[in-house]
């Protein structure tokens, strides 16, 4: 059984979490996700990764609770460690990652989405939040750290200690979700098809995907370092881009007053 479904769409690799009924994750699913992230990272034909859930009800409802109930403390520790490593790999991959929130995104499901660069939600798709406090535990797959960095400590703490769930629209207002798309925005398309079309705008020939990836690297790693170290990383990323064909094309197109045609090289 494949727990991560893969599909390619002209430079966009879609990774679908598929673990009915709620797309919860186990160690086995995380192993598959880990492999899928590494494969997408190494594939030069992949410029953007879209992460979504199977079906229309859940993006992901977090870790499989029955598995956690029966597992030993040692197993749980190593399970959380590997999940952290997998999401770190997703976050640090120098390719844009978009989480397409097609349904309820709660607990570890939100922690998975927080490792993406953009979170696009379908209007009225379901609830979103970190309710782990109701189980007597904390968000243990990066939630305490990523949510605080995204929303600020006070807001993140309030959401976690209350366990409050929000609508996608409320989550957008709080800064947790990038955009919420309604029927007008979908314009007759399915939600996933619309997200894929949006993702393609960040691929060649429309966008210099190398530059998108290096911007991501500078932000993700630089923000965790001191200001001087962040500037040093920015310079390194810029130097790499100056050597690329896309930079030569972008500069030439600007001087020639034409639209650039990027190749992702």
Image: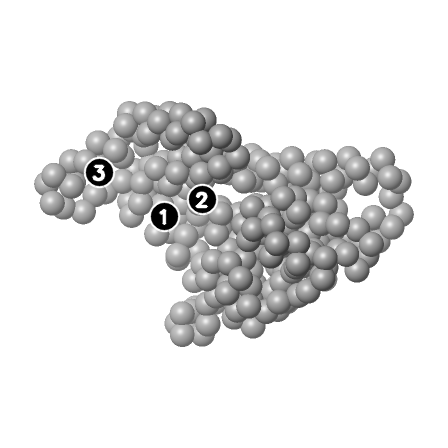
Residue 1 rendering spot, x and y as whole percentages: 71, 48
Q: Are marks 1 and 3 in contact (CB under 8 Å)?
A: no
Upstream in the sequence, badge 1 or badge 3? 1
Compared with 213, 150 (above or below) is below
Q: Are marks 2 and 1 in contact (CB under 8 Å)?
A: yes
Q: Residue at x 76, y 39 (%)?
A: 79
100 left or right, relative to 86: left
Upstream in the sequence, badge 2 or badge 1? 2
Query: To which quarter of the image does residue 75 belong?
Result: top right
Residue 124 rendering spot, x and y as whole percentages: 56, 72
Residue assigned mark 3: 250
Residue assigned mark 1: 202
Residue 33 rendering spot, x and y as whole percentages: 63, 42
Q: Crowding near pointer 3: few (<14 within 10 Å), some, many (20+)?
A: some
98 left or right, relative to 211: right
**How many dots with numbers?**
3
241 left or right, relative to 108: left
Query: To which quarter of the image does residue 125 belong?
Result: bottom right
Compared with 225, 254 (above or below) is below
Q: Residue at x 62, y 67 (%)?
A: 166
Q: Residue at x 61, y 41 (%)?
A: 87
Q: Which mark is residue 96?
A: 2
Upstream in the sequence, badge 2 or badge 3? 2
Asked whether the viewer can see residue 35, the reply is yes
Q: Residue at x 39, y 48 (%)?
A: 10
Q: SS for tag 2?
A: strand
Asked whether the viewer can see residue 121, the reply is no
Q: SS for tag 3?
A: helix
């Amino acid at each position: 059984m494949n727990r991560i479904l893969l599909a390619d769409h002209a430079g966009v690799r879609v990774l679908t979490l598929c673990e009915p009924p709620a797309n919860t994750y186990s160690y086995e699913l995380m192993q598959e996700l880990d492999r899928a992230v590494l494969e997408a990272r190494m594939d030069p034909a992949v410029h953007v990764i879209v992460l979504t859930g199977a079906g229309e009800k859940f993006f992901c409802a977090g870790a499989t609770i029955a598995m956690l109930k029966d597992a030993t403390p040692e197993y749980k520790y190593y399970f959380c460690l590997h999940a952290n490593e997998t999401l770190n790999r997703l976050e640090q991959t120098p390719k844009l990652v978009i989480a397409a929130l097609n349904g309820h995104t709660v607990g570890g499901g939100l922690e998975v989405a927080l490792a993406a660069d953009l979170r696009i939600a379908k209007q009225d798709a379901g609830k979103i939040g970190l309710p782990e406090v109701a189980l007597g535990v904390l968000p243990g797959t990066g939630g305490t750290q990523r949510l605080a960095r995204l929303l600020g400590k006070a807001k993140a703490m309030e959401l976690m200690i209350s366990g409050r769930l929000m609508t996608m629209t409320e989550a957008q207002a709080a800064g947790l979700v990038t955009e919420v798309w309604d029927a007008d925005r979908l314009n007759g398309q399915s939600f996933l098809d619309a997200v894929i079309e949006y993702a393609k705008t960040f691929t060649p020939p429309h966008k210099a995907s190398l530059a998108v990836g290096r911007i991501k690297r500078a932000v993700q790693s630089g923000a965790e370092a001191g200001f001087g170290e962040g500037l040093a990383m920015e310079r390194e990323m810029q130097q790499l881009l100056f050597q690329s064909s896309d930079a030569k094309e972008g500069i030439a197109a600007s001087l020639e007053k034409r639209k650039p045609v990027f190749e992702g090289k």
